[in-house]
Each structure stands twice: as C-alpha cells, then as structure tokens.
Amino acid sequence: MVLPSHRTKMVCTIGPASAQPEVLTAMMQAGMNVCRLNFAHGQFDGHAATIRLIRDTAAAIGHRISIYADLPGPKIRLGNLVGGQCTLERGAPVTLTTQNIEGTADRLPVRFPELAQSVGPGDRIFLNDGFLQLTVNAVSGTEVACRIDVGGLLLSHKGVNIPGKELPIKAFTPRDHECLDFAVRHGADVISQSFVQKADDLHEVREAARAAGGNPLIFGKIERAVALQNIDTIVQAADGIMVARGDLGVETPIEGIAIAQKRLIQHARRAGKLVITATQMLESMVGNPRPTRAEVTDVANAILDGTDCVMLSEESAMGQYPVDAVQMLARIAAATEAGWRDPEMREVLPHLETLLSGRPVADDPQIEEVIAADVVTAAIRLGARMVITPTTCGQQPRRVAAHRLPCWVVAFTPNPEIGQQLNLCSGVHTVDVPAKGTDWKSVAGLWCKDNGFTDGLAVVTHHGAQGQAEATYCLEIIDLATYFT
C-alpha cells in the first residue's frame, strides 16, 4: 500500500447520500477514516444495517474504518406547530410554554419542563440555530413571555438554545443510555456525548460504557458556554473533544468562534487528547461540486491549529457530492501539511514552531512525553522516513504524533481495539500484529518491505526490556536497509 498524501484524519457523517456500497467505497478510497452515525436521527435497526454495510465495504477493499457513535444529548426543541410552521414577526410578543399544545405565532410549546426555572427577564432565547432570537420579558408559572428581536419562518421541532446558562438537565439522558448500549453492542470505537457541561457528564458516560462491556474512546462535544468555562476538567475526563461549532456558535457570540476553536485545540493538545473540528467545513458542497474559498481556508486553519480530524456533516450525509467533499478535504489537508515546514510560515504563525518542534507539548511533561519529544527531534534532524512504535495501549504513538511530524508514525499493535482508536490520531498509521506472542519486529520488517520502505533511516521507540519499569523506553535510530534482515 502507499500511505496517504495527508496525515489529518477525516470523519464523515453517514446518511442517505452515502449509505450505499459504491459511495462508501469511493469515500474510503478518497481518504475517509471514520464513519459517524448521528443517533439524533434514525432508528436502531437502520443504524445496525449501516454499521454492517460500513464494515462489509471496508473489509472488501482492505481499509481500516472506525465507527463513531454520536449520542443526541439533551437537545431542547419546540413541540408541534399548527400546520407544521409559523412566522414570527420582529417586535411582536410571543409566549413560550411547557404545556403540550400545538403552537402558533403567539404561543410556542417547548419540550423542556424546567424552562421557566432556567430563565429570567433580559435573558436571550434562540430558536432554529439562532436564526430567530427572543428576549425574555417576564416569567409566570410554566410560561415565559418574550419579545421577538429577530423573526422569520419557524418549523415544528426546531432547536431552542438558552446561551450562557448552566441548565438543570443531565447531559447523559435515558435515551443516550439506550443509544450507548446499542453502540457498545455493535462495537463502536468512539462514543461522543453532546452538550457536555462538566467532567462528571463524561465520567457517567465512561462508566456506562464499561458496564455495557465496552471500552470505546469517550469524546465530549463542546457546545455550551459553560463547557468553555470547565474545559480543563472536561479535557482531563475525555479521550478527546469535538469543537462542535454549530451549537457553540449559538450558545456563545459567533464572532468569538475562531478564537474559541484555537483555544480548545490547544487545551486538548497540551493534555495529549484528540480533537475533531466540525460543522459547516464544506457546507456549500451540499449542493455544489466545489467549496467556497472561505471554506477551504477554514479547513486549512483548523489543520494549522493542530486538529487531529476534520469532519463532514450534512455534506456527506445529505449532500449531492459526498465523494467530492472527501476528495476536497484530502487535497486541502495535503496542501496545508506541505506548507508546514516553509520557513515563512513559521514567521507568520509562530505557534507552528512549537507544534512541529521536539519540545514537549504538555506544560508539565511526564517521562513519556520527554521521550516522545526526543523521538521527534531525532526524526526531524535525521530526516527519518517514519517513526516506528509497537504499542498495546496507543499512548506513545499519540504523544509522538501530537508534534505533527513530516513523516508518518507507524504503530504496530496486537490489540485491534487500539488500532481502531488510533485511526482518529493525525499522522498515525496502524498495522495489526497477529497475536501478542508474535515478534513485532518480524511484522514491521515484512510491512516495510511490502510497502517499499527498504532504505533510509527510521526512529524506533518502544518499552525497554521485559521486567524494566513501565516508564522505561528505548529510542533507536535504524537503517531500514539492514535492521529487519
């Protein structure tokens, strides 16, 4: 095989536009690494069929594809409207009620029993992803009287956001628990919790996954202002985070999203955690074969920020050009990564010096992180063709890859679960070692020979001899022409 031209990983939401064997095959061949299933939509039977289709398609062409289960979380929504829609006029009054009614332009049902206890006069309430905006005038019983600041067409079941509030609802709902049990039974590699507010939300998800017999990566979706305030503890509780710019751009001022994204990615990188950047990355490709220049720049900037993955949502689930969108992501990633080492880029973006250097990523590095930094320094100065690391838990490949090397980190693991999880880590290519008793060197030697890596230098990092302390690592510089013979 030939390693991809880009090291940034790609997460694609699977839906009606992409859930066909020929489309999935083309998306995988174009560079898709992870298939996301959005449990806010669809039924379990349909998701089970999609998972089977993904795995059968990946097996048929020999690709590693990870399954990402996205739990819906406690999304607040409107109830039914008369005729399915109404139009709100700017300046007019409207009352929000928790009563189960059919709504009209002057009285809207909200499926959130604690609504009246959660807001007060002067608070803002956004409808339909912030396209319609209200200000609270008064609260009485189960009803909230509002003024319409920004009106427009409103459909049944659209989302309701109350920005800046820590709401009295659990992130991990009973419905989420059902979805998690299903995801674990069907071998999901990653499970993400929506609308995380604090670290305990993720602890609860992890405990539920273990109780169900699984050990997937647990991601927290950063979508609320309170999550930004609690980001340090959330990152520590998670295996990774998603910069979910959709609801985050409603819950927080939209003009601050770019800075929030950069800060979130830095928080995750310093903690050695994975990051997905998502929402509207190539949204114009839902209906057009080419993206806008702004979208191309957006994807490139996320990569320059240090994201592990970029994600397609509606583009791949419902769009007319799902394969073209994946191909475009791959082209943008390859071009952006090629520019990383341009000296002028380091002058323009000083943070690249840290991102690409051998300096430890963490503020207070542990022994393993210092070793990883040494590996990076050696690989860069020697122009190594790759970094080779055998692993059973996946930690060291992640630490090394966090520096965004110009070469691939090739991880050899006897643990299929770890191989699937490393599929989300930028710059890491995983090779399965058949069994724990198999000598990883023999597998690595055969893989290098089969893939044309028969000359040049490589850096090898692995645990020391058996019986030594767990934190003891060896670092070797090897000649690929002779090491495996």
Image (spheres, rainbow, N blue to C red):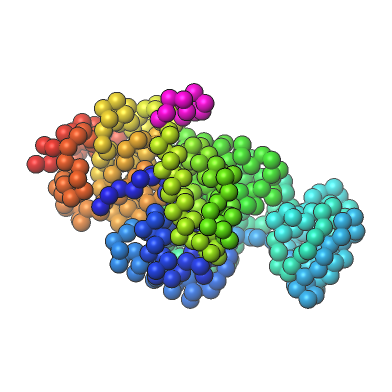
Residue 242 in view (yes/no)? yes
Relative to 161, is 460 on the left or the right?
left
Please tell me which residue is depicted at 29% across the width and 25% down the height of the picture: 381
Relative to 287, is 344 on the left or the right?
left
Please tell me which residue is depicted at 55% across the width and 71% down the height of the picture: 42
In the orientation shown, which residue stands out farthest toward the left?
485
Please tell me which residue is depicted at 32% across the width and 38% down the height of the picture: 407
Task: Report if residue 342 lies within the magenta region.
Answer: yes
Relative to 236, is 426 on the left or the right?
left
Q: Quadrant of the C terminus?
A: top left
Vertical position of residue 470 compared to residue 444: above or below: above
Residue 314 in view (yes/no)? no
In the orientation shown, which residue stands out farthest toward the front?
289
Q: Position of residue 313 (x, y in %)?
A: 54, 58
SS assignment for the magenta stretch, majority: helix
Rendering quarter of residue 441: top left
Rendering quarter of residue 416: bottom left
Rendering quarter of residue 21: bottom left
Please tell me which residue is depicted at 90% across the width and 55% down the height of the picture: 91
- The span picked out in magenta is 341-352
Judge by depth and name the residue closer to the eye, 252 or 240.
Answer: 252
Q: Position of residue 292 (x, y in %)?
A: 58, 49
Task: Report if residue 456 lies within the magenta region.
Answer: no
Q: Position of residue 96 (x, y in %)?
A: 82, 62
Please state the total of marks drawn on the protein image.
0
Judge by depth and name the residue closer to the eye, 62 or 122.
Answer: 62
Q: Position of residue 184 (x, y in %)?
A: 43, 64
